[in-house]
Amino acid sequence: MEPIFIGIDLGTTHSAIFYASDELTQGKIESFSIPQLIAPGQVSEQTLLPSFVYTPHESEFLQSDLLLPWGNSPLIVGQLARELGSKSSGRLVQSAKSWLCHTTVNAEEKVLPIDALDEVPKLSPAQVTEMLLRYLADAWNNSFPNHPIQQQNVVITVPASFDPAARSMTEQASQKIGLNARLIEEPLAAFYAWLSEQEKWTSTLEVNDQVLVIDVGGGTTDLSLIQVTDADGHLQLERIAVGRHILLGGDNMDMSLTYHVAGKLAQDGVQLEAWQISALTQACRAAKETLLKDGEIHETSIVVPSRGRSLLANTIKSSLSRDEVNQVILNGFFPQVGIGERAQKLARSGIRALNLEYEADPAITRHISEFLTTNHSAPNKVLLNGGVFNSEIIVNTLCAQLSVLLNHQEVSMLTPSHLDFAVAKGASYYAQINAQGGIKVKSGLSANYYIGVESPMPAIPGMSVPIDGICIAPFGLEEGASEVVLPNEFSLVVGEDVQFRFFQSNQSEPQAVGSMVSSFSISSLLELSPISVRLFEGHYKLGELVRVVLTAKVTELGILVIEACDTQSDLTWTLEYQVRES
């Protein structure tokens, strides 16, 4: 059976699937239409699946109202979920993907919806992630019963800044529904989508070109830098920098307009309830898209449902003008900033409501400035991705601000793939070239990485235990490459709290795997954040030393994975370390 290459964009606000195969698409990359409820009892196939989950009241619908082509579900996913959630509070889960990276909420902790009614069972971010993936898998298998998705080559996209725990949770969710999927960063997937549409990419890019990928999604902004290099006369692509996790996107823009309109209504003596704020946000999103796209419409009505007794009192009305949208969106999110400006940090209240950890500074241009300053970069090419950039005025504004930010040097804008679907399309193309060959974006380590190993030297009074540095991942080790095996055996402490120390070299000269920097010279290395952990003891005693062999690899997402394999049994212990943010 011919392989099918499937790309899944598991987005914060929308999800999408693209696929390619010789049998189904004659090798072309095509969009998969996702069946979903758009009204009670009414199913429609849409190219995007809103990443929303709604828990209906037990008497809200008949069982037949919620029937999908592959069966019933007690929860509603997709377009109808989003619309129902805009009319009531405490029943809608949204932005579950962003909760996977929360610093104080465990991904398996049942906290969603954050405003849940007493009768609504709460779900964990991990559960919602699995639920959305299962929905997409069921939709695929219903359409292609002879080509189950569990047997295909699947790539799932995640934010470039996802931490190891969030990446791991996404992988686990895919494994629970039988997928053996690879992960790829969203900005990189958008770049692969651009590559897939180029007859000859070398006619557009040349040696030393730097491409800044700006991916503004519904919930996050991701930044990446890709450079064109020369390898023995052949052009290559290398991803050289990735931005930090920025919880800032189109949802923030919709909320800004919501508060703007709510303020106008308050001046007229109208105070909105919590459930009306959700409805107002949906109305502002639609108004934003209309006013930013259509140059002939200068004002649009905003209608908010009410629970008044009179039929005439069933709605609250306001309006949004093009000038208001420009003022809120362009000035607030894309202001002009100077070279070297960094995202502003605001004083925080001592007690905060439990919610997502939004960015304090909404200026996307300031976050771009910080990213370029940190990486000492002045790119000459820019690739945009995300539905926000469907607006020509936003694109023109950002281009003008980038010109100022880059000291008025000439910047070329690469023509993007479809802004709403590029990530899923690029993931499908990436799956295809992984299997069949093609140009890949390299991403090797920018330094040698070492793990601290307790020295065999005897203890000396007044001196801490000496630590040697053992090279576990050399400079240039490519992300996604096969694992490397350290040449010597080591002893591993299991069953009690221990600390693993990591170091990074200041030089770009590759070192041999397993080479040592002695405790006397360890100060020549830069020490990174340590990991404190208690490793499962298995059949060993607490605190026992186990003889192990160490292997290391770096994933496509920049995670250094270290495995300690017991030489006397089949036990294996795994450590994960984010080398991009070190």
Image (spheres, rainbow, N blue to C red):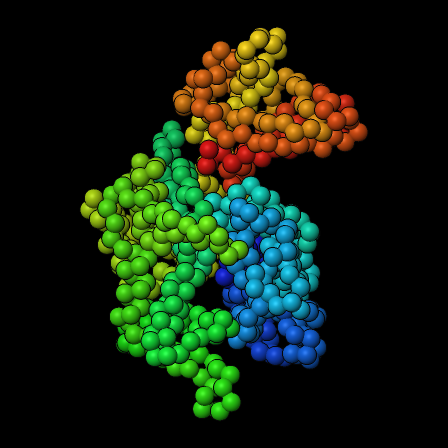
Q: Nearer the viewer, residue 263 or 336?
A: 263
> What residue appears at the point 45 percent right and 59 percent down from the top-left corner?
218
Residue 525, position in %: x, y?
45, 20
> What residue appears at the point 36 percent right and 47 percent down from the top-left corner?
345
The answer to whether 157 appears left or right of 270 in the picture is right
Residue 189, position in %: x, y?
47, 49
> What residue appears at the point 48 percent right and 54 percent down from the top-left corner?
352
The correct choice, above or below, for 422 with respect to 295 in the image is: above
Can you name the residue that lies furthest to the right here? 539
Q: Nearer the viewer, residue 231 or 40?
A: 40
| Residue 426 visible, this orientation | no
Residue 483, position in %: x, y?
59, 30
Q: Nearer the viewer, residue 176 or 529?
A: 529
Can you name the residue that lies furthest to the front here? 350
Residue 221, position in %: x, y?
41, 52
The answer to whether 456 appears left or right of 211 in the picture is right
Quadrant in which residue 498 is drawn: top right
| Residue 359 visible, this orientation | yes
The correct choice, above or below, for 534 with respect to 213 in the image is: above
> What residue appears at the point 28 percent right and 76 percent down from the top-left corner?
298
Count up the numbered dots: 0
